[in-house]
Amino acid sequence: MTLPEPCRHRISVLGAEKVAVFGHFSLNLQSGVVYNQTRCWHDFGLPINASTRFLGGTVTFEVGDKVIYPNHGLGIVERIEEKTILGTTCGFYHLRIVANDTTVLVPVTNVDGVGLRRAITDEEVERLFGLLGDGKIDNHQNWKGRFKDNSDKMRSGSIYEVADVLKSLTFLSKSKSLSFREKRMLDRAKFLIISEVSEVVRETAVTIEGRVDRALERCFTVKARTAAAPRKTTKQAAPRAVASATPPRRAARAS
C-alpha cells in the first residue's frame, strides 16, 4: 500500500545524509532506514503474519526477536510489514528501541548494511569481559585519527569494537580531559555494553556496570605492569679480532 500523499512532506539534507521527511517519520535515502520522529507511528502498511520471514540479508528475524541496532542498542522486532515508500515496495522490520521507546523501520534487504544483529550469547559475554580486562589498549595520539577510528567502531555493530572504544577512551580520560564529543562517545559505548549484557544475563544494569568497571581496572593494571616489566636484552658477543693477512712490520733498528 502506498503512503497517502498528505504524509509526503519534503526531502532535506541532515548532516551528510539525505533524508526524506514525512509527516511522522524520516527516511534515510542511503541506508533505507526509517526513523519515527514523534513516537506515534501511523500504520499505512499491510501487516504480515507473525511467522513470516523476509529473506534479503544473511540474517533474518521474527516478531519478538531481540536485536541490536548499531549505536542505538537493544531493540525488539514488533512487526514485519510491507510498505511502499518513494515508489519502492519492500519488507520492513518494525523495531522498538528499548532505551528511548522510539521506532525504527529497517528494510529486510538491508539488514547487513545497517549492521542489525542478534544479541550476544552467554559464552560471548565471558569473551567480552576477557577482552575488557586483557590490558591491550589501542590509542591514537592524533585526535582526528582517533575520533574517526572510534566512530567507525561504534557504527560497526560489533560489541567487541565498542569494547575497544570503551577501553581506549576510559584510559585516555585518566590522563587528560576528553572533548565533549569523545565524552559523549565514551558514555554511549559504556551504555551499549551494559544494556546488552544486562539483557543477556538478566542482571541489573548496576550489577553489570560494576563488572565492567572492575574489568577496566584490571585492564589498566595489566597494562601498567607490562609497561613496568624490564625488557630482556640480548647480549651481543664482542667482535673477534680478525688476524691480518699481512705480517706486522718490524721496527727498523737504528744503525
Image (cartoon, helix red, strand yellow):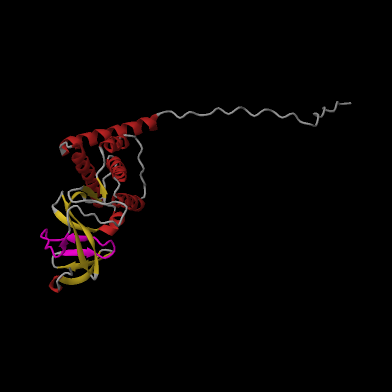
Residue 213: percent from the left, percent from the top?
Answer: 23, 35
For the record, the magenta segment spans 25-47
Q: Is residue 146 above or below residue 16?
A: above
Residue 175: percent from the left, percent from the top?
Answer: 29, 40
Q: Quadrant of the N terminus?
A: bottom left
Image-quadrant location for residue 219 = top left
Viewer-nearest residue: 95 or 89: 89
Image-quadrant location for residue 79 = bottom left
Q: Main secondary structure of the magenta part?
A: loop
Residue 194 belongs to magenta span: no
Q: Quadrant of the C terminus?
A: top right
| Apparent side of residue 164 relative to residue 196 in the rendered image (left or right) | right
Residue found at the far right of this picture: 255
Q: Is residue 26 above or below residue 206?
A: below
Q: Residue at x 14, y 71 (%)?
A: 4
Q: Residue at x 19, y 67 (%)?
A: 21
Viewer-nearest residue: 158 or 51: 51
Residue found at the far bottom of this picture: 5
Residue 30 belongs to magenta span: yes
Q: Residue at x 35, y 34 (%)?
A: 223
Residue 250: percent from the left, percent from the top?
Answer: 82, 27
Image-quadrant location for residue 28 = bottom left
Q: Residue at x 16, y 64 (%)?
A: 45
